[in-house]
Amino acid sequence: MPRKIKLDEPVVNQTVETELSDSNYSESIKKSTCPKDDLLTYSEILKATLAQYPSKMLFSIKDSANALSVSPEFIRKKISDGFIKSVSLGDRKMISINELAKIIYQGV
């Protein structure tokens, strides 16, 4: 027999009072949470990636998956779907460090 779960009633029209009423504080919050200020540029991501892997220009599928914290199957699927560009070296697919930086910057 399935259980019935009773949810609490949603709170409607309830105001929350804050102790801080300083207008300068609210302006500084608006300025610091602007998403454009917090984002890294592609060149900054590429520099950080190059600094982290100074001797590598091409990554295997396994190394790419480790660098991006995803599974190798995910990388293989995105390569076959055309979302990730790869270079063939013999029978191996390799991903450039620029492509990794692009994936970090834009996503897949």
Image: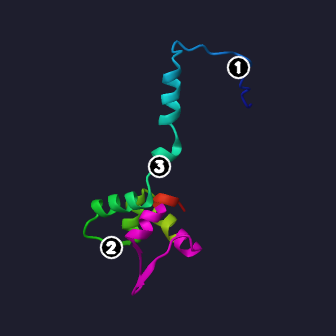
Q: Which residues are magenta?
A: 77-103
Q: Would residue 85 be counted in the magenta stretch?
A: yes
Q: What is the crowding at mark 2: few (fewer than 14 residues within 10 Å), some, or many (at least 20)?
A: few
Above or below, 46 relative to 20: below
The residue drawn where x is 39% and y is 87% is: 90
Residue picked out by circle 1: 8
Q: What is the crowding at mark 1: few (fewer than 14 residues within 10 Å), some, or many (at least 20)?
A: few
Q: Is residue 2 left or right of residue 57?
A: right
Q: Quadrant of residue 101?
A: bottom left
Residue picked out by circle 2: 57
Which x, y percent locates residue 26?
Answer: 53, 25
Q: Would residue 13 be counted in the magenta stretch?
A: no
The residue drawn where x is 38% and y is 72% is: 60
The outermost residue toward the left is 55
Above or below, 87 relative to 34: below
Residue picked out by circle 3: 39
